[in-house]
């Protein structure tokens, strides 16, 4: 009887693994064609889980180990995470967290330091769990996982002395560096769209929209490449911030859900056990008033041909009256000598060992594969490429972005002309680069639809801001677009980690929130607003990016150490003069914010406006909006 139960269990495991492999290998971008496959593999794992619960004693007597139960739960967590990557629905991310946390709390991988294969499985599990916790902003859990990762490595070095864990040390180094950069400034508010802080996502009545229909953000492509940039797995600090900026903050009763509540069986206390009733979390998180999150494709160090192929796929499947956002953070320069230590996304394990590469997106979050010579060529060559020393590191044409090292030539060069074919469909383009000005030619050269462009400053780190290093802190421009108060504090040299200053920072957040509402009204009523801006303004995510761009431009234009246009971001086509850095509303907003934080002396306000009735009038407008919103000014 026990043999029959064991055979049935192994058969269910094999069937579930085969179905999982089919879903795992499907691309994350494009339409969600894998919905039916997801349901099949989900049902297969639920059937497997239920079978092992009902026959636990017999399976244990037949030799079932707790680690095998943990592997099944880990697979289900992976399944939920990959579904999040395809749909951008946070409920799937939360479900992955539920499963992973149950595995951790019930010690399913206990004693893994005595078995090399089991140790690698726990290390992979911990790395996957870290990524999920990062995306859910569970900093305390991330710290707990890092400590467990370190202690496991120490135990393995003592008990498995013949094995090498050097590359797993780089995983710890990456996550520590990432967390340090992300938590250097205290977050006053979520990065995600949060109705208490952001304007309610109602459809604005845009005066200049006329007969045009508004556009809705449906898909976003996010990619970043800078040498030695802060990253973990395939998520760089810049894409991490932008990803959250394009999602809704979970609402409803979700905040009261206890993820750590466990039963004696090591599973969450839900009717069906172990958190498989994802519809209950979905109902708790969903807000009928909020539209779904736009789908996002995250590409790490893609070749230009791969990037173009993904853009083409998304554009081809773009729905009518929808728009695609492309965010690219890359340098206009190539490194002349690219030699770096292995990292968590490129490191390789010794091929003689039973486990393979340390986490890459397709390994850390999805699958395990064996190390081969081809893998070494693919991932190792980029870190140890021999680069030509001829000429300057800046591309001679000055018109491209580098998505990789210069040793690979044109494969890594992205030109503005590469984007033009996709302007047959509505496009919202954000270029964060020291060569962003090269992409200004996209405006006026579109193939069908007018594109909206937000371009970062092209100048290097300006004088007086040496403390802001993009390789350690991420891009300042992206920081302004995703966390404007934190970016402002970083610019002027403030640290909001002081608990005594938290009330001041909350007041500053209120000032900025009210000013953003004023800018929204100004844009919506403007008769000079270009049609492309008028069409995207009703979309809450794109509207917020536009408003934060206005704030960023105002701050940098009036920041005393700048003084040159190359330090200023640009937009194409131009926004109305009523939101320019020289107008009274913009300057009064910045003056109030700087006064609140005690840094007025760091900005050069226009003399003709300083202290005039124009500023008084603009302040009155902001205060009126404050009263309407019920916020503190």
Image (cartoon, helix red, strand yellow):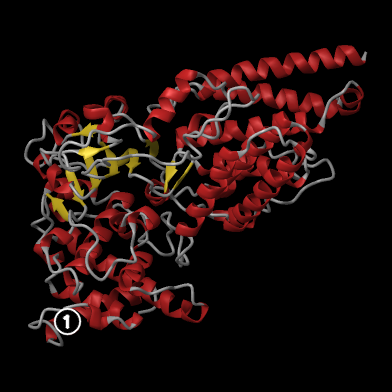
Task: Tell me residue 551's x, y (percent).
Answer: 24, 65
Residue 187: give x, y in percent of width and height.
46, 65
Q: Secondary structure at mark 1?
A: helix
Split into 4 quadrants, where in the image is the C terminus?
Answer: bottom left
Left or right: residue 547 versus residue 294 is left
The residue lying toward the viewer, choosing from 141 and 284, is: 141
Q: Please give the count of numbered marks on the rendered protein.
A: 1
Indicate the position of residue 401 as horizontal and vertical percent values: 22, 39
Q: Which residue sits at x=91%, y=16%?
A: 2
Measured along the vertical axis of the image, is residue 185 above or below residue 382? below
Quick check: 284 left or right of 601?
right
- Residue 229 at what x, y percent from top left? 38, 48
- Residue underneath mark 1: 615
Say if residue 567 shows up in the picture.
Answer: yes
Report whether residue 210 is seen.
Answer: no
Q: Residue at x 37, y 27 (%)?
A: 30
Mark 1, other Cα within 10 Å: few <14 / some 14–19 / many ≥20: many
Front residue of this view, candidates 427 and 502: 502
Q: As rendered, which of 225 and 604 lies closer to the eye? A: 225
Q: Where the N terminus falls, by quadrant?
A: top right
Q: Is residue 247 left or right of residue 450?
A: right
Residue 220 or residue 172, whichever sits in front: 172
Vertical placement of 251 versus 239: above or below?
below
Give the residue displayed 34% in from the left and 82% down from the top: 596
In the picture, residue 7 is in which quadrant? top right
Q: Residue 311 vs residue 264: left or right?
A: left
């Amino acid at each position: 009887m026990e043999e029959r139960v064991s055979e049935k269990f192994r058969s269910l495991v094999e069937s579930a693994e085969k179905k999982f492999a089919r879903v795992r290998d499907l691309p994350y971008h494009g339409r969600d064609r894998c919905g039916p496959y997801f349901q099949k593999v989900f049902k297969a794992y639920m059937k497997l889980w239920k079978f092992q619960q009902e026959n636990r004693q017999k399976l244990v007597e037949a030799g079932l180990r707790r680690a095998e139960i943990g592997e099944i739960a880990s697979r289900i967590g992976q399944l939920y995470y990959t579904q999040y990557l395809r749909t951008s629905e946070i409920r799937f991310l939360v479900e992955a967290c539920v499963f992973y946390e149950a595995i951790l709390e019930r010690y399913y991988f206990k004693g893994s330091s005595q078995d090399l294969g089991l140790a690698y499985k726990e290390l992979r599990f911990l790395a996957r769990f870290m990524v999920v916790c990062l995306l859910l902003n569970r900093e305390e859990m991330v710290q707990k996982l890092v400590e467990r990762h370190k202690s496991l490595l120490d135990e393995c070095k003592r008990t498995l002395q013949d094995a090498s864990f050097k590359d797993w040390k780089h995983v710890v180094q990456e996550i520590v560096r990432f967390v340090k950069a992300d938590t250097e400034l205290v977050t006053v508010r979520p990065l995600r769209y949060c109705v208490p802080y952001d304007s309610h996502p109602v459809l604005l009545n845009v005066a200049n929209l006329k007969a045009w229909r508004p556009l809705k953000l449906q898909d976003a492509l996010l990619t970043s490449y800078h040498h030695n940039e802060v990253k973990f797995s395939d998520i760089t600090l810049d894409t991490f911030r932008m990803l959250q900026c394009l999602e809704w903050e979970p609402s409803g009763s979700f905040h009261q859900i206890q993820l750590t509540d466990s039963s004696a069986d090591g599973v969450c206390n839900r009717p069906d056990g172990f958190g498989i009733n994802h519809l209950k979390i979905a109902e708790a998180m969903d807000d009928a008033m909020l539209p779904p999150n736009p789908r996002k494709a995250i590409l790490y160090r893609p070749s230009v041909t791969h990037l173009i192929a993904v853009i083409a796929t998304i554009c081809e499947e773009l729905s009518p009256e929808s728009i695609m956002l492309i965010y690219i953070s890359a340098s206009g320069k190539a490194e002349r000598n690219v030699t770096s230590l292995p990292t968590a996304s490129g490191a390789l394990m010794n091929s003689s060992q039973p486990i393979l590469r340390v986490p890459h997106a397709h390994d850390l979050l999805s699958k395990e594969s064996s190390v081969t010579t081809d893998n070494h060529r693919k991932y190792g060559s980029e870190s140890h490429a021999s680069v030509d020393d001829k000429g300057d590191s800046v591309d001679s044409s000055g018109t491209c972005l580098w998505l990789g090292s210069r040793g690979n030539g044109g494969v890594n060069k992205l030109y503005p002309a590469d984007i033009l074919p996709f302007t047959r469909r509505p496009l919202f383009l954000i270029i964060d680069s020291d060569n962003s000005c090269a992409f200004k030619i996209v405006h006026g050269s579109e193939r069908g639809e007018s594109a909206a462009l937000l371009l970062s400053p092209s100048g290097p780190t300006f004088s007086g801001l040496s403390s802001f290093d993009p390789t350690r802190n991420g891009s300042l421009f992206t920081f302004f677009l995703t966390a404007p108060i934190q970016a402002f504090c970083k610019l002027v040299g403030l640290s909001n980690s002081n608990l005594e200053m938290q009330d001041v920072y909350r007041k500053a957040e209120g000032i900025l929130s009210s000013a953003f509402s004023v800018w929204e009204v100004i844009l919506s009523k403007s008769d000079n607003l270009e049609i492309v801006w008028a069409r995207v303004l009703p979309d809450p995510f794109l509207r917020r990016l536009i408003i934060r761009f206005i704030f960023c431009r105002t701050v940098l234009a009036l920041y005393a150490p700048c003084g040159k246009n190359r330090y200023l971001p640009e937009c194409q086509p131009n926004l109305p003069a009523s939101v320019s850095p020289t107008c009274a509303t913009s300057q009064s907003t910045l003056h109030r914010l700087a006064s609140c934080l005690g840094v007025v002396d760091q900005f050069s306000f226009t003399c003709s406006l300083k202290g005039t009735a124009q500023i008084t009038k603009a302040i009155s407008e902001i205060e009126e909006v404050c009263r309407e919103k019920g916020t503190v000014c």
